[in-house]
Amino acid sequence: MSPIREYRWTLRRDTNVTPEITQTAQSLSQELSVSPILTEILVSRGIDYIRKSADILPTSMEDLHDPFLMNHMDAAVKRISQAILNNEHIVVYGDYDVDGTDSTAMLWKFLKDGGANVSYFIPDRIKDGYGISTAGIDHVHDAGATLLIAVDCGITAVQQVEYAHSLGIEVVICDHHEPGMKFPMLLPCSMLLNHHVLIHLNIFVDAEWLSN
């Protein structure tokens, strides 16, 4: 079995970093109101003024692409909004790494603040393994949920999604990983959103729910 922590990522420290580069990173940090660690990374990649950085760090809603350009966004928004209005139990099914726990917390809080009947499930890395598992789906089913929203996982979980459907659980998958040869979205009662769509999903579930 591979060790739990196989790699340790560190920020490269160039020996030729000049005071000018440090000053640029500090100034950009103040202009963008973000961490100087982040702007140091940006400056080291040649993103050294605010107009360049705005392409990477959107500062307004106008900077975002239309999320409905993404396949299945409309279906996902309608299904989640329906679940909120009908007081269905929703489970946000996350992952145990940083982006998995962050996205779980973001979506759970958004739905909770909106009055949804929502809980979350993050699998145990040792006992449950990575991604959506049948044991995890059993937990969702035992909780009485009818809608599972997977974040940071699920894009290859074809059999697991089939199993969820057999238990009467519909599935929305928000995942940024590469798919396998077969997509869970080809199954009935599932929606697949791929590539960092959580912010878009929150915004448009909010708009759809308020319109009702």
Image (cartoon, rainbow, N blue to C red):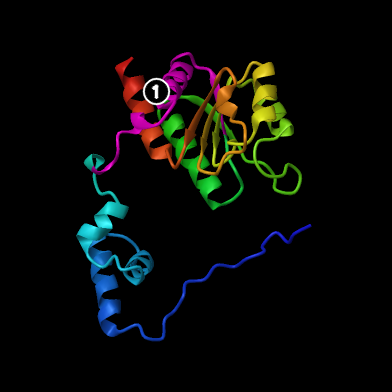
Q: Name the image quarter holding residue 145.
A: top right
Is residue 70 in the magenta section? Answer: yes
**Range drawn in magenta:** 63-92
Residue 67: give x, y in percent of width and height.
34, 33
Packing grade of label 1 (10 A; few <14, some 14-19, many >=20) is some
Is residue 91 in the magenta section? Answer: yes
Q: How many marks?
A: 1
> Is residue 171 shown above or below 3?
above
Seen at 30% across and 78% down, the residue is 22
Identify the element where label 1 is drawn: helix
Residue matched to label 1 = 74
Q: Name the image quarter holding residue 167.
A: top right
Name the one closer to the observer, 2 or 31.
2
Q: From the viewer's perspective, is 8 left or right of 125?
A: left
Q: From the viewer's perspective, is 102 left or right of 18?
A: right
Seen at 28% across and 49% down, the residue is 58
> Is residue 122 shown above or below 183?
below
Seen at 67% across and 41% down, the residue is 123
Residue reaching furthest to the right: 1
Residue 24: give x, y in percent of width and height.
25, 73
Q: From the viewer's perspective, is 116 left or right of 153?
A: left
Seen at 25% across and 66% down, the residue is 28
Residue 120: give x, y in percent of width and height.
58, 34
